[in-house]
Amino acid sequence: MAAGATVDSPAIAANYWSQGLNDNQPFNQSAGNGALYYVHSGDPAYLFECPEYNGCPAAGMIVHYPVGAVPSEGSDHHLVSFDPTYLGGEVDGWGGYGCTGNLLDVVPTGSCLHPCNLSSGLPGIANCSYGGFSSFSGSGLGNGGDAAGYAYGLFQVTAQELLNGQINHALGIVQSCLDNNGVFPAGRVTSDNPCAGTGVAEPNASYGEMIHLKSSVNVASLGYSTYCQTIVQALQTYGAYTVDNDNGYGIGLEIENVNNPLYAQNNPWTNTIFPSIVAGGDGNGSGSSFSFQSCLQRIPASDIEVVDIVNDGTYQTSARSRRGIATRS
């Protein structure tokens, strides 16, 4: 336990379960799983623009994306450039305002398939609502890549990690609702979708809290399928931070865009990972439409604890990050 960290009342852990932490969650492109693209030398360049939040950290940067990169389809249309080659950092684009530069919410249509879009040119234009930037040498906090202010790539579970059988970082969890007065390491103190008044039992969860599977739990004895066991082991080793809310959808883990078009015919999610999860009794579905119970359905609320971390001064974050004060649909 980090110095100064405190464990919240068990009632808060129970509240996570009341919101659906152990419910079935579908995982497909429309569910909002993030598109995070690893940049290589020679990938096309784009001038980053953010008309909705003019002056975002990535404004004016030359950002690279692989050929075929597109934003994810969920409400925020995340488009992330994970770039060790040119920038030595991560650019987190998001928003549903990018198709024509207008400031109105845009639902994907035939003429506007991907808000937060890329247009070709020398350089092309990356036109999103907002773009945060995090140097790989920094903490990843205060970036604005998600509602809590974290760099978007900090917590995503990738197919490669599951295939390797090891996740070496904390997880991220999207809540159905999160209350105000967030705690470190979140940079957000207000919520798009606060829990109070929604009928969810008090006390409620808030931004920045860490869900942790108690160390006394024997993960191997829970009967999980192979890939779910890998996720649950990370929940025990590193915990999972609250990163965003989804306005009543339930609770899901931050997982890469499982329908990434760059996977083409060799999609490890639909070919290997999800079929194994279904065969192991932790999900259902077939083809490109799967659901599984957050890989947490075998854990009772009594086996988790909710931990508040104290900033020891090593890390810098800002409650005024533009993503932290934006109102999201």
Image: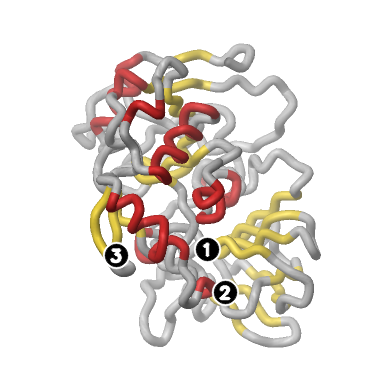
Q: CA distance from mark 3 to mark 2?
A: 21 Å
Name the kind of residue labelled 1 in the image.
Answer: Ala
Give the residue number, with chain letter if any, for mark 3. 289
Quadrant for residue 36, please give it: bottom right
The spot of residue 251 in percent (x, y) is 33, 42
Give the residue number, with chain letter if any, for mark 2. 69
Pointer 3 or 2: first along the chain: 2
Give the residue number, with chain letter if any, for mark 1. 35
The spot of residue 171 in percent (x, y) is 50, 39
Name the kind of residue labelled 3 in the image.
Answer: Ser
Residue positioned 43% across, 19% down in the render: 214
The spot of residue 288 in percent (x, y) is 33, 68
Figure check: 304 above or below 256: above
Pointer 2 or 1: first along the chain: 1
Q: CA distance from mark 1 to mark 3?
A: 17 Å
Name the kind of residue labelled 2 in the image.
Answer: Ala
Q: CA distance from mark 2 to mark 1?
A: 8 Å
Q: Secondary structure at mark 2?
A: loop
Which numbered dot is residue 273?
A: none
Q: Are marks 2 and 1 in contact (CB under 8 Å)?
A: yes
